[in-house]
Amino acid sequence: MSNWAIIKTGGKQYKVAEGEKLAVEKIDAAGKDTIQLNEVLLVKKNGTLKIGKPLVANIKVKAKILENFKDKKIRVVKFKSKSRYLRTRGHRQQKTKILIEKISV
């Protein structure tokens, strides 16, 4: 993993490298199969490290959308003792699986 970058998408930060697959928060790219992630915070390319303030200029990460899916279910429980109050709900987060194709300068 010699060339890598730290990107920001969906309010979260991810360390990515070319050829890597990862699941991120859902990306609405209607009809597109490739996207460009412009919010690059840090990049290491050919041994040099560039740190953004807050973003690195002229760096783009090209990614291919593989699929949209729902994450595993989490259980949310509200409970109050001695009052017979119990509420159980489930939640499945919408996610997108992407493949990082290229980190370009």
Image: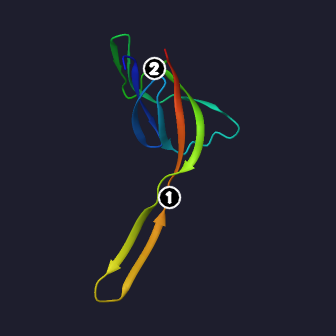
- Using the image as rendered, state which of residue 56 and residue 105 is in the foreground: 105
Label 2 Cα neighbours within 10 Å, binned few <14 / some 14-19 / many ≥20:
some
**Would residue 46 appear left or right of 33 to someone viewing this image?**
left
Residue 55 percent across, percent down from the top left = 41, 27
Q: For numbered disc 2, what is the local secondary structure? A: loop
Q: CA gap, disc 2 to disc 1?
A: 35 Å
Residue 85 percent across, percent down from the top left = 37, 84
**Would residue 89 appear left or right of 80 to someone viewing this image?**
right
For the point 32% across and 81% down, the residue is 80
Seen from this angle, which residue lies furthest bottom? 83
- The residue singled out by tag 1 in the image is 92
Q: Amino acid at mark 1?
A: Arg
For the point 48% across and 62% down, the residue is 91
Residue 86 percent across, percent down from the top left = 39, 81
For the point 46% across and 70% down, the residue is 89
Q: Is residue 54 above or below residue 12?
A: above
**Would residue 62 appear left or right of 55 to someone viewing this image?**
right
- The residue singled out by tag 2 in the image is 57
Instruction: Find residue 61 and name its label.
Output: none
